[in-house]
Image (cartoon, grey):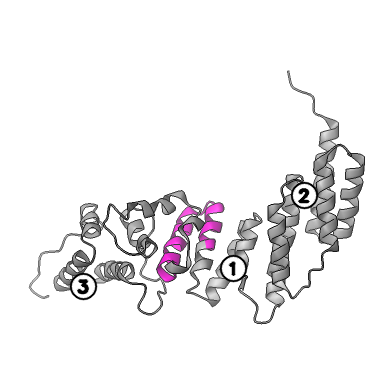
Amino acid sequence: MEMASDPLLENLTIDRGRIADLIAEGRLDHAAYRARHLADRHADDAGCAADARRVERLVETDLPRDRPVAWAEAFRKALAETDGSPVVTQAVRRYLARGIARSAEGAPGRAATVEGAPVGAYLLDADLPEEAAASLYAALATSPTNGIAALFLANALLRLGRVEEARDNYRRAFRISPLDLSVEQIADDEVRELVELADELEISGDVRIWLPAIGLLEDVLPFSALDPVPGAGFGDGTRAYDLLVAHKGARSHRERTAIRRDLRELAPALFDALLSSRKLDAAPTPTGTA
């Protein structure tokens, strides 16, 4: 036997949805009025009271269009508040995240980051992955070596179910700017767990630099020779991946042999693992022309 629906709860859901729509439209005064009216009608519902306070505070807060930092501070406070209804809470967060994006566009120099984080990261925290991805793609177009933007783009693409594209950007992030990133920021469990193989592969130094090579070994991160690695890179981990790139493009037996020798000397356990997993093709028989 089906349970009868509760008209009171249905009406409450509809009312909260309308408040959320008004917030998204930027009609904050109307949203605050409806939220307070709803709280008065449901005086015994703590969530309604919390929603009303939150929207009223949003109306009262002075958020200049050209000050993204002020928007970011308000957004952080909204993230910490969880006592209201999910639909209104999310609407407030999305309003503020979009406000960060708009104010950053209007700020002097069109700020790509706000308080050290890409604008797209705020959009992602507000559960707006499509808008986050668009913002982060734009950030990388103007700053190709922005590893933080690449990492958050990967997280956004993962949220959208675009796993291969996400992992392409995880590799890119840790190729171009590994020391600016935290492994804990990676949303993909398989990618994050690659760090656990460092001891087994006898890797020394900062494991973040080695993630692209370990990811290739484990068939987790796709191979690419196109990442815009700045300058001399970041040490042995960069060098190891550069050797893998060179090996893929080598045209002669002599080249391949020299590259494999260098890779074996640089990271013997990684070399053996790559060889046994057939990530390095066997050195071809000399043709007499190399």
Instruction: Pick the residue in front: 198 or 150.
Output: 198
Q: Is residue 63 visible?
A: yes
Lower sequence index among marks 3 and 1: 1
- The x, y position of residue 260, in whole percent, is 19, 66
Q: Main secondary structure of the magenta part?
A: helix
Of marks 2 and 3, which one's residue comes earlier in the chain? Answer: 2
Tell me if 16 is positioned left or right of 166 in this view: right
Residue hosting label 1: 118
Residue 221 belongs to the span the image colors magenta: no
Q: Which mark is residue 88?
A: 2
Residue, far bottom: 108
The residue indicated by pointer 3 is 251
The residue shown at (23%, 54%) is 273
Query: Label 2 amino acid?
Result: Val
Query: Looking at the picture, which amino acid does disc 1 mark?
Result: Pro
Q: Position of residue 183 (x, y in %)?
A: 46, 58
Q: What x and y, as percent, mark residue 185?
A: 51, 57
Quadrant of the image containing the C terminus: bottom left
Q: Quadrant of residue 106?
A: bottom right
Q: Mark 2 to mark 3: distance in Å?
A: 61 Å
The answer to which quarter of the image holds residue 237 is bottom left
Provide the residue span drawn in magenta: 152-177
**In screen coordinates, is 235 left or right of 83?**
left
The secondary element bearing badge 1 is classed as strand
Judge from the rendering whether residue 63 lies leftward or rightward of residue 248; answer left or right. right
